[in-house]
Amino acid sequence: MSEGHNSANVAGAQLRSVVERIENLAAEIKERQVDTKEIYSEAKGNGWDVKTIRQLVRIRAADPAKLAEQDSLLEVYKSALGMV
Amino acid sequence: MSEGHNSANVAGAQLRSVVERIENLAAEIKERQVDTKEIYSEAKGNGWDVKTIRQLVRIRAADPAKLAEQDSLLEVYKSALGMV
Amino acid sequence: MSEGHNSANVAGAQLRSVVERIENLAAEIKERQVDTKEIYSEAKGNGWDVKTIRQLVRIRAADPAKLAEQDSLLEVYKSALGMV
Amino acid sequence: MSEGHNSANVAGAQLRSVVERIENLAAEIKERQVDTKEIYSEAKGNGWDVKTIRQLVRIRAADPAKLAEQDSLLEVYKSALGMV
DNA sequence: CCCTGAGGCTTCGTAC
DNA sequence: GTACGAAGCCTCAGGG
């Protein structure tokens, strides 16, 4: 068995591992993207305004401090809807 | 306790649930994106060409039929320009 | 009139010139980017596939040697994964 | 002369026109990018801090209102340098 | 040589 | 459904 052959095998195994781990993570990301879409659909079915929820999520993501004020959530939503 | 108050509470709880589930999924996606980056970095450290691995992953993820179609369309356009 | 004052004026004028020339060039670049978008839109309206035209333009702009090298590296990686 | 042939010619000419116009615009953009780089180099040669000028240009681009306040330019630069 | 930052491309969400 | 705009991803260049 040649040394080059072993090297190729080792390299191949390493590359395969890299690619597979990346693909697994990509699959897990995809699942969660699908789940997210389903939650939005479900919310829409319950009468919520999807666009506003997206906006809300964006705002909360942008300002982590806001996450502490759990109780302000509904207020933010109402404001966004002009329900003040 | 007014009926309107109860409705608000129920609605608020529902909205809260929606937003939290979305945010949890977003956090999980973020983790996996970070992991993916780390794998690419590690691969780079082992001497692999990151750009080529990305290309490889893209090809493996893509629908082969779509790829072939895109390639043939490109050939048509090349021909139209005399890029034989 | 102090020497420092003059220095500040001269420096300010020079800086202003630098910034304005950069901004003028940026504006001209912006115009051409808009024009480019319009050409793609027009092409799309005439039934051309924009993605493929972009691909074509990229290929024409790229160094053929680099392209070939990237392609061959990709083949090496594919082989390592047994993607014959 | 076949109809298909004419169609191909017409299509080819149209595609060629599209591609050439795009490439011409790309060339003009490239020129201006080069010019921009030269201005930065020249500024650097005159003792200006390129990074800070870039920052300044970015700020002005982001807030068009600031462009009216031509006189605040030097102040902004000084502030950025801690020369207040 | 690594690493940040700037630029360009692609995709997704939204508005018309 | 089309077109516009924003966000994320990828690539490359310049500076440390």
Image (tube, coloured by chain):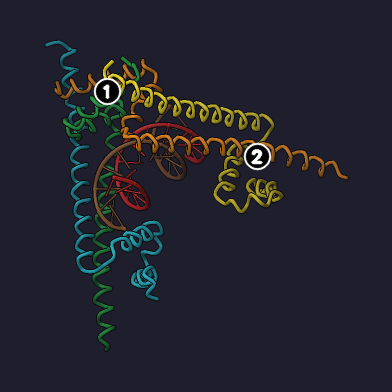
Chain colours: A yellow, B orange, C green, D cyan, E red, F brown
Of the 4 image quadrants, the one containing the C terminus of chain B is: top left
Of the 4 image quadrants, the one containing the N terminus of chain B is: top right
Task: Identify residue for label 1.
Answer: C76
All told, the count of numbered labels is 2
Q: Secondary structure at mark 1?
A: helix
Quadrant in the picture for residue C58: top left
Position of residue B22 in the picture relative to residue C81 (left or right): right
Name the foreground residue: D21 vs A30: A30
Residue C28 percent coordinates (x, y): 25, 51
Label 1: chain letter: C
Name the foreground residue: B56 vs A67: B56
Residue A53 percent coordinates (x, y): 61, 40
Position of residue A47 in the picture relative to residue D78 (left or right): right
Question: Please, is residue A41 above or below residue B19 in the view?
Answer: above
Label 2: chain letter: B
Circle 1: residue type: Val
Outermost residue toward the right?
B1
For the point 38% across and 21% down, the residue is: B60
CA gap, disc 1 and disc 2 = 45 Å
Task: Identify residue for label 2.
Answer: B20
Quadrant in the picture for residue A18: top left
Q: Nearer the viewer, mark 1 or mark 2?
A: 1
Residue B22 percent coordinates (x, y): 61, 36
For the point 19% across and 51% down, the residue is: D34
Circle 2: residue type: Glu
